[in-house]
Amino acid sequence: MILEEQRFLHEDLERLEQGVSDRVAEDPRHIRDRLARDHQISGFLERIHQQSKRLIDIYKDADGIRKREIQSVSTGDPFEEFYKQLDDIKDFHRRYPNEPVENLERAYKKKVPGEGDIVISEVDNMFTGEEAYGRFLDLTSLHEDYLNLPTVKRLSYLQYLDAFDAFTPPLCPIKRPEKTNDQYFTYIGRLAEYLEGFLKRTKPLEDLGKVFAGINSDFEKAWDAGEVPGWTKDSQPTGPVAPTALGGTGEGIWCPDCEKEFTNENVYKNHLTGKKHVRAAELRKARLDGANGNSKGEGAPRASSTQSLKERAVAEREFRVRKLSAALQQQRIDTRINVERKQGMTERERQMELDALFAESADAYPADGRGGVGGDAESDSDGEEKIYNPLKLPLAWDGKPIPYWLYKLHGLGVEFTCEICGNFVYMGRRAFDKHFNEARHIYGLKCLGITNTSLFREITVIEDALKLWDKIQRDKKREKSSTENVVQMEDASGNVMPEKVYYE
């Protein structure tokens, strides 16, 4: 029945293509529905790939079964072959009377829920409540794992969001020899696994296999060249200059074994005989010998190679975390803003926001089954009219007005006009203070010929900015001229005069 299987695969591919086409034509409003649609399309594309592979194998006909079946149908008695296949079908259904028949016409059509049905999407169990269907990162458990690592400083969750992909001093207090222990290896592996899984869950239609392969190839090149940050060849100098790249200030005495800076020479000399320094020096020497291939003894090469493999595995995971966090930069910024916002909310407001999120998800599929993408224009307009905002409050991330107390707290009703920015109006003191470092204000100052923009905070009028800039220029000229007149010269007659007059 190879020909029947071939026909079935062709029909299945056409149904799959139609299913993909129907879902691409949709435009869901809710992020939950968009993710569910993308994951369905991803599943269809994967099945298309599998069915196409089976179909190609049939056409190749490596065992010759398809050729023999075609020959038996075309050369022998057609009625005899027909009744033979009919007997085979009857015999199959006699042995399996309750075998379900797959209806391809309904298999890939979008199911519209009936009245009273509870709609459960496949993305409901993919994300935690903190992730909000892929809008934010949820690094709370990884933050706890980080705090349990030895020798780390206690960081708040907001500080951790800024520094979780920093693995070099001064942001990362963990030294290179301490990164090869099992606890740190488990932590960095979990972090890389979470970011990779988050990318797969939020972007199911992208070719992530190609992205991950590119990260691996970039790491191989950087590792072979010794350019992986934090894992470069150990050639740190010992002396009076502390490398600033390793957390030093550049002014004290640097010990490369302990990776520590000493401001006092006597303290530096006394620490050389301590157990901690001796142990650190031995570890560094073993690492250098392993890198240069100078290990002696039978067990030494095996130990150095094991240490090198550990370092390579940790470096690969750190490199992967850096690349993945760069790809998720927008979600990282949104997560920080969301955490700051939630820290200023009461427990009651958090619960109200959670209820509103669940209600918004339920509104996508009302009980009458007309909601979501398949609903009519009337239901869409009804959903849009539900937002009641008589005070014209700014909208939050969920498209609903922010609380009035938050509006008053940040002074969002106060207008600040900046003439330098083209009479642009900023709502609230926070946005006004922030705009002095933004490109719009800096560009306006440069158009006026002002280069040193750091001295012009709180100045919004063009005339005041020009007056201040003229005063700064005059003061600079006066200071320069006074500096030139500092040196006094005396001529042969004993007359004292400035150096400039003396040489003239």
Image (cartoon, rainbow, N blue to C red):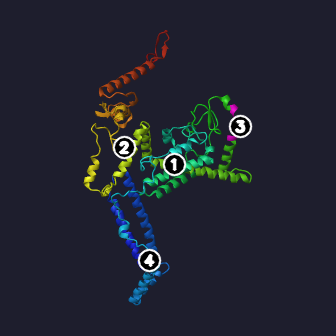
| Numbered badge on residue 171 | none
Looking at the image, tell me whether mark 4 or mark 3 is earlier in sequence order.
4
Residue behind mark 3: 275
Distance CA(mark 3)–CA(mark 1): 35 Å
Distance CA(mark 1)–CA(mark 4): 54 Å
| Numbered badge on residue 321 | 1
- Is residue 318 visible in the rendered image? The answer is yes
In this rendering, position of residue 86 left or right of residue 167: left
Distance CA(mark 4)–CA(mark 3): 80 Å
Task: Say which amino acid is labelled 1.
Answer: Val
Looking at the image, tell me whether mark 1 or mark 2 is earlier in sequence order.
1
Dot 4, crowdedness within 10 Å: few (<14), some or many (≥20)? few
Mark in the foreground, 3 or 2:
2
Looking at the image, tell me whether mark 3 or mark 1 is earlier in sequence order.
3
Picture layout, residue 463 above or below residue 166: above
At x 45%, y 70%, the residue is 53
- Taking the magenta stretch, the answer to whether it contains residue 441 is no
- Where disc 2 sits, the SS reads loop
- Where disc 3 sits, the SS reads helix
Residue extending farthest to the front is 116
Which is nearer the eye, 116 or 385? 116
Distance CA(mark 1)–CA(mark 2): 27 Å
Q: Which residues make up the magenta segment?
A: 269-280
Q: Identify the main secondary structure in magenta.
A: helix
Residue behind mark 4: 97
Mark in the foreground, 1 or 2:
2
Distance CA(mark 4)–CA(mark 2): 56 Å
